[in-house]
Image (cartoon, rainbow, N blue to C red):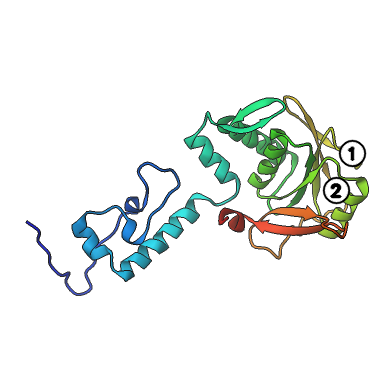
Amino acid sequence: RLHLEYFAKNDHYDISGRTLQSDTITNLLFAGRNISASEEALASARVIGTCLATGYAAGHLAAGVINKVPDFLYQSARHWPNNPAVIDEWGMVTYAELDALVRQIAANLRALGIKPHMGVAVIGRNSHYFIAQCFAVMECGAVVIPLSNEITTDEVNDIIKTTGLHAILADQTTKAHFSSAAELITLTHQEWRLCFLKNADDTMPFAAHVKNPALVRFTSGTTRISKGVVLSHDSISER
């Protein structure tokens, strides 16, 4: 038999965060009248004030799961470790394998001097190594500028001049020329060079005008002049 009663003045009840989570679909949150609850409980929780509160809570839960772009990869590796993440000329790479590669490269980059708030250009051919290098730079807390291996020396110099870049990470197929005195990161199928730019100011954060910057996307458009758009971890996570 159903028994209903009013709460005493200033009394309240709590709604568990687990009522907002899907039992079968990963990364899916519910709010408002869609939460998991009995008919009796929902009779009270369905009102607008509670719906707003659960929506606000769902937003906080989502924000807490993804703090930076590489978290998307780590989350996928936990849920689908053996699923294909990338297929390139070397074959299939699973989420677990890409996760491990990113963490390994990030550890190497930190040891070599890559720090948070630096700007690092990654220049290379399309491959899972290129993807891993970009993720690793962001994992270090630095801002990545992904560039094609077809980019010219003049174009690279223009980007260095206009952005205040700190370092360049490039594979052996890169056509642009820069300092040969670079640390070498050796991977299974490719070799990558890391070059710190001589005039870079390590005390000057890269893209400081953007909160929590993650990536700079350069395009020449129709003007043939490179223009960069800064994307933050937050803006990418919201897409």
Query: Residue at coordinates 37% horizontally, 49% vertically from top-left?
Result: 21
- Name the residue located 22 percent from the left edge and 54 percent from the top edge: 38
Q: Secondary structure at mark 1?
A: loop
Q: Whole-percent x and y of residue 157?
A: 90, 51
Question: In the picture provided, is 236 more to the left or to the right than 79?
Answer: right
Type of amino acid under label 1: Lys
Q: Which residue is mark 2?
A: 197
Q: Give the amino acid at mark 2.
A: Leu
Count residues near mark 1 (Cα–Cα under 10 Å), then give few for <14, some for 14-19, many for 20+. some
Tell whether label 2 touches label 1 (CB within 8 Å). Answer: no
Work out whether mark 1 precedes mark 2 in sequence or the reverse, and give the earlier one: 1
Residue identified by numbered label 1: 175
Which percent across, then down, holds residue 99?
Answer: 59, 35
Residue 195 in the figure: left or right of residue 112? right
Res. 205 in view: no
Label 2: how many residues lie within 10 Å, few (<14), some (14-19) or many (20+)? some
> Which dot marks residue 66?
none
Q: Position of residue 52 (x, y in %)?
A: 37, 67
Q: Secondary structure at mark 2?
A: loop
Q: Is residue 87 above or below residue 202?
A: above
